[in-house]
Image: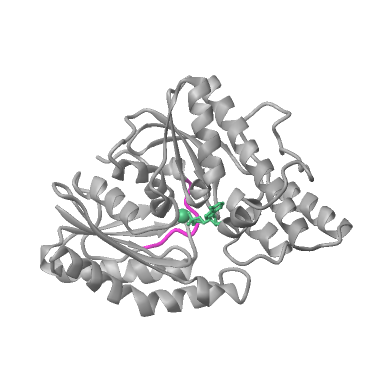
Amino acid sequence: MLVLGIETSCDDTAAALYDGERGLLAHRLFSQIETHSQYGGVVPELAARDHVRKLLPLVHEVLGRAGAGIPDLGAVAYTAGPGLVGALLVGAALSHGLAAARNIPAVGVHHMEGHLLAPMLEENRPAFPFLALLVSGGHTMLVEVSGHGRYRLLGQTLDDAVGEAFDKTAKLLGLGYPGGPAIAAAAEHGEPGRFTFPRPMTDRPGLDFSFSGLKTAVLRTVRAQKMNGSAVADISRAFQDAAVETLVIKCRRAVEETRHRRLVVAGGVGANRDLRARLAELAKSEDIEVFFPRLEFCTDNGAMIAYAGWLRARNGGGTAGGGFQVRPRWPLAELEPPA
Ligand code: KG4
Ligand code: ZN
């Protein structure tokens, strides 16, 4: 079965084609960074309008690349939530339109399930069960994954997501949007140890996170400094060290508490090289395996939605005809295994 996947939950418009027998056939993404960077963050209305402009051309592009046409599709999968309501509606409306026209199912995919399953698109894929660290602009979660659609939340952030902390810290430091890559680049030239920031909530038991205090600690340091290029680099370095070490400490704790032998890392912050290196070290010392999607499938993409949609469509998931809904807020643990 050939499935078209559509992602429009935030500031990336993406489309991909996944085929049950041939695997991933094509994927394309249009990033809206240029639209939003002048505002220092995503402007929801502009995001929705950009999706309207870019989505259909991207769909035609992936079909063209795969040498396929709309009549070849067996299902259309789209991100139904969580995300920005106006942005989600663009993908949902197109998907349901296409599905109704062709009398095929439209499958609403949970964006975080897409992230969580993204490592399955790689050659070295994790087997169930595993632990998943999901780190994006909107989420920071540790999840126990006992099978497809069987997710138990072990811990999550009580305030800001870690990606959000990268973005806000970058803004404070006058670095661009999105902040994650900007901080990582600045940190490369930073001197380790010149500044030290807290590792929030690591001194008490449990697997929850909190990142808003880290941003405040950065703010205090910025105010107390004569800011120049090296201060920006050194603070970026200290911030990244604190954020990464906090995530690694919680992953180690989750491995020790649950005794799972496989750890999956996904979501935009999973593209952070420092985090990947530190988790690879953790895997070595704990004698576990760690799985990452390739960098471009860590951040938002259509491939993960096409794949997660295919997994559900092949089991009869999705709806044909009738109305549809998007879910800007949608707890991951509410998902169920395919019928
Ligand atoms: O998964 P994603 O593309 O979108 C959401 O679902 O939120 O994640 C975006 C987040 C942003 O906060 C961005 O700053 C962060 O991922 N990010 C990074 C890196 N690349 C993207 N954070 C740290 N290091 C990176 N290299
Ligand atoms: Zn995402």
Quarter containing the C terminus? top left
Please state which of residues 94 and 5 is positioned toward the viewer in this rendering: 5
Horizontal relation, residue 155 to residue 97: left or right: right
Rendering quarter of residue 39: bottom right
| Residue 178 in sight in this render | yes
Residue 71 lies in what quarter of the image? bottom left
Q: Above or below — where is 100 with respect to 299?
A: below
- Residue 266, horizontal then vertical, whole percent: 45, 44
User: Does the magenta portion include 206?
Assistant: no
**Residue name at image x 25 percent, y 45 percent:** 311
Q: Vertically, is 229 above or below 257?
A: below
Q: Position of residue 133 (x, y in %)?
A: 50, 38
Residue 74 percent across, percent down from the top left = 15, 58
> Which portion, as a residue range, is magenta?
325-331
For this view, does 129 lie left or right of residue 5?
right
Q: Residue at point 55% right, 35% down? A: 278
User: What is the residue that sits farthest to the right in this orientation?
Assistant: 224
Residue at horizontal 58 percent and vertical 56 percent from the top: 180
Residue at 26% across / 70% down in the picture? 59
111 sits left or right of 196 in the view: left
Q: Residue furthest left?
A: 71
Residue 326 lies in the magenta-colored region: yes
